[in-house]
C-alpha cells in the first residue's frame, strides 16, 4: 500500500464580519456574555454565497497551493450539514464549478467531525491505489439553519470552508486515523429535515416544524471534553508518541473552554492547541481545515512536524488523525 500526504491547503470565508456587538443589536446578548462563555469575538456570515460557492473558493486555493490542476483531481469529498440542496450533492456542484471533469464526487455528513471522516475516506482510496489526488472539503453556511432569535446558539456559529488535497506519496504524511460515533446521544444536537408528508402517512406524525440547530449545550460540553482528550491519547498510543513530540494540535473550533479543558486533561502546553475561533466562530466541518490552512499560510509548519487534528460534532461523532507535515 502507498502513503498519503497533504499536498495543499486552502480556505475561504465570506467578507461579511459580524461582531458580538452586531449580534447584541438583534438578540439579548453582549460581547462580554459571548466571549466569556465561548471565546468568540466575531464570525463570518454569508451575504449570498451558498455552501458550494465557499467550497469552490477554498478548493481553488488548495489546488493552487499544491500546484495541481483541477483536471488531475480523482475524487471530491465535501463534508457538510448545510448542502445547497438535497440533490445533486454539493460535491457535484463543486466538481462542475472547478472543471474537475474526471473526478468522482459525493458528500458526507458527520457534522463537525465531517472533515476528519473525509480524510479517513480519502486516505483509503489513495492507499489502495484507486486514486492519486483526493480533494477533501469542509464547507458550511450554518447561517441557513441558525435560529436568529435563540441567543444561546446564534452567537456560536459562522460560515466558511476549508480544503486539503490528499496526494499519493512514498513518504508517510497521514498516519493513524480514529473515527467514532455515539448515535444514542444524537438528540443533544439536531437540525431537522423535511417531515414525512404523503397520502399514506397518518396525520398525527409529530414534527418540530423547523430545521434550526437545537442544542443541549451542557451535554455537548460533557461529550466534547471527554472525547477530545481520549481521541488525542488514542492517536498518541497508536503512533507511540507523547505530547512532547507534537508541534500542534488542531482542534475543532467550537468553544475555547472545551479546548482548554482538553489541554489540561492531557497535561499539555495550551500553546500547542491552535485556536482561531475568536475570528470565525464554530464553522462545523470547516473549522479544522480553515485552521490548518491558516497555520500553513503563516509559515508555522516545518518539514516533519507532527500534528494531530481532533474534533467532535452532532451524531454524536468524534475523530482524530495524525499528520506528519511534508513540504
Image (cartoon, rainbow, N blue to C red):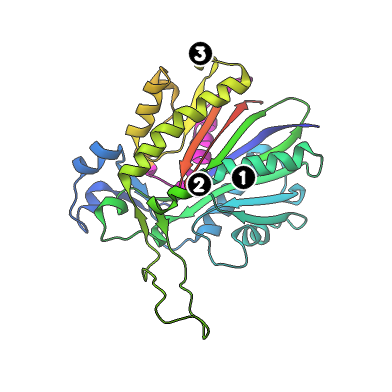
Residue 319 placement, left or right of 147: right
- Closer to the chain start, of discs 3 and 1, is 1
Q: Assess whether mark 1 and mark 2 are in contact (beta carbons under 8 angstroms).
A: yes
Q: CA distance from mark 3 to mark 2?
A: 27 Å
- Residue 131 falls in image quadrant: top right
The spot of residue 121 in percent (x, y) is: 67, 44
Residue 258 placement, left or right of 247: left
Q: Assess whether mark 1 and mark 3 are in contact (beta carbons under 8 angstroms).
A: no
Q: CA distance from mark 3 to mark 1?
A: 27 Å
Q: Which residue is mark 3?
A: 244
Q: Which residue is mark 1?
A: 118
Q: Nearer the viewer, residue 224 or 116?
A: 224
In this view of the protein, can residue 300 be seen by the observer? no
Q: Residue furthest bottom?
A: 199
**Disc 3 on helix, strand or loop?**
helix
- Magenta stretch containing residue 201, yes or no? no
Magenta region, residue range: 280-307
Q: Assess whether mark 2 and mark 3 are in contact (beta carbons under 8 angstroms).
A: no
Q: How many residues crowd mark 2 within 10 Å: few (<14), some (14–19), many (20+)? A: many
**Disc 2 on helix, strand or loop?**
helix
Q: Nearer the viewer, residue 292 or 113?
A: 113
Q: CA distance from mark 2 to mark 1?
A: 10 Å
- Residue 280 falls in image quadrant: top left
Residue at figure coordinates x 66%, y 56% from the top left: 106
Q: Which residue is mark 2?
A: 285
Residue at figure coordinates x 50%, y 13% from the top left: 244
Give the vertical position of 85 relative to 16 (above or below): below
The spot of residue 77 in percent (x, y) is: 64, 50
In this view of the protein, can residue 44 be seen by the observer? yes
Q: How many residues crowd mark 3 within 10 Å: few (<14), some (14–19), many (20+)? A: few
Amino acid at each position: 500500500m502507498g502513503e498519503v500526504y497533504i499536498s495543499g491547503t486552502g480556505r475561504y470565508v465570506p467578507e461579511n464580519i459580524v461582531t458580538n456587538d452586531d449580534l447584541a443589536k438583534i438578540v439579548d446578548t453582549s460581547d462580554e456574555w459571548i466571549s466569556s462563555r465561548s471565546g468568540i469575538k466575531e464570525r463570518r456570515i454569508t451575504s449570498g454565497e451558498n455552501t458550494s460557492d465557499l467550497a469552490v473558493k477554498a478548493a481553488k486555493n488548495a489546488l493552487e497551493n499544491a500546484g495541481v490542476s483541477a483536471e488531475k483531481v480523482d475524487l471530491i469529498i465535501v463534508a457538510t450539514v448545510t448542502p445547497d440542496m438535497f440533490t445533486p450533492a454539493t460535491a457535484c456542484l463543486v466538481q462542475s464549478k472547478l472543471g474537475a471533469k474526471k473526478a468522482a464526487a459525493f458528500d458526507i455528513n458527520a457534522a463537525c467531525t465531517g472533515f476528519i471522516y473525509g480524510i479517513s475516506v480519502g486516505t483509503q482510496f489513495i492507499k489502495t491505489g484507486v486514486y492519486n489526488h483526493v480533494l477533501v472539503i469542509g464547507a458550511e453556511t450554518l447561517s441557513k439553519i441558525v435560529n436568529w432569535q435563540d441567543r444561546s446558539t446564534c452567537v456560536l456559529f459562522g460560515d466558511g470552508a476549508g480544503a486539503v488535497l490528499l496526494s499519493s506519496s512514498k513518504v508517510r504524511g497521514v498516519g493513524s486515523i480514529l473515527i467514532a460515533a455515539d448515535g444514542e446521544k444524537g438528540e443533544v444536537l439536531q437540525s431537522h429535515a423535511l417531515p414525512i408528508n404523503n397520502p399514506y402517512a397518518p396525520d398525527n406524525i409529530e414534527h418540530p416544524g423547523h430545521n434550526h440547530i437545537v442544542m443541549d449545550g451542557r451535554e455537548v460540553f460533557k461529550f466534547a471534553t471527554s472525547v477530545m482528550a481520549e481521541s488525542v491519547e488514542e492517536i498518541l498510543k497508536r503512533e507511540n508518541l507523547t505530547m512532547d513530540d507534537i508541534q500542534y494540535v488542531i482542534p475543532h473550533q467550537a468553544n475555547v473552554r472545551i479546548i482548554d479543558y482538553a489541554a489540561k486533561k492531557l497535561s499539555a502546553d495550551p500553546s500547542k492547541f491552535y485556536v482561531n475561533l475568536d475570528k470565525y466562530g464554530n464553522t462545523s466541518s470547516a473549522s479544522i481545515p480553515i485552521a490548518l490552512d491558516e497555520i500553513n499560510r503563516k509559515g508555522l509548519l516545518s518539514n516533519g512536524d507532527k500534528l494531530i487534528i481532533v474534533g467532535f460534532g452532532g451524531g454524536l461523532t468524534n475523530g482524530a488523525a495524525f499528520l506528519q507535515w511534508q513540504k
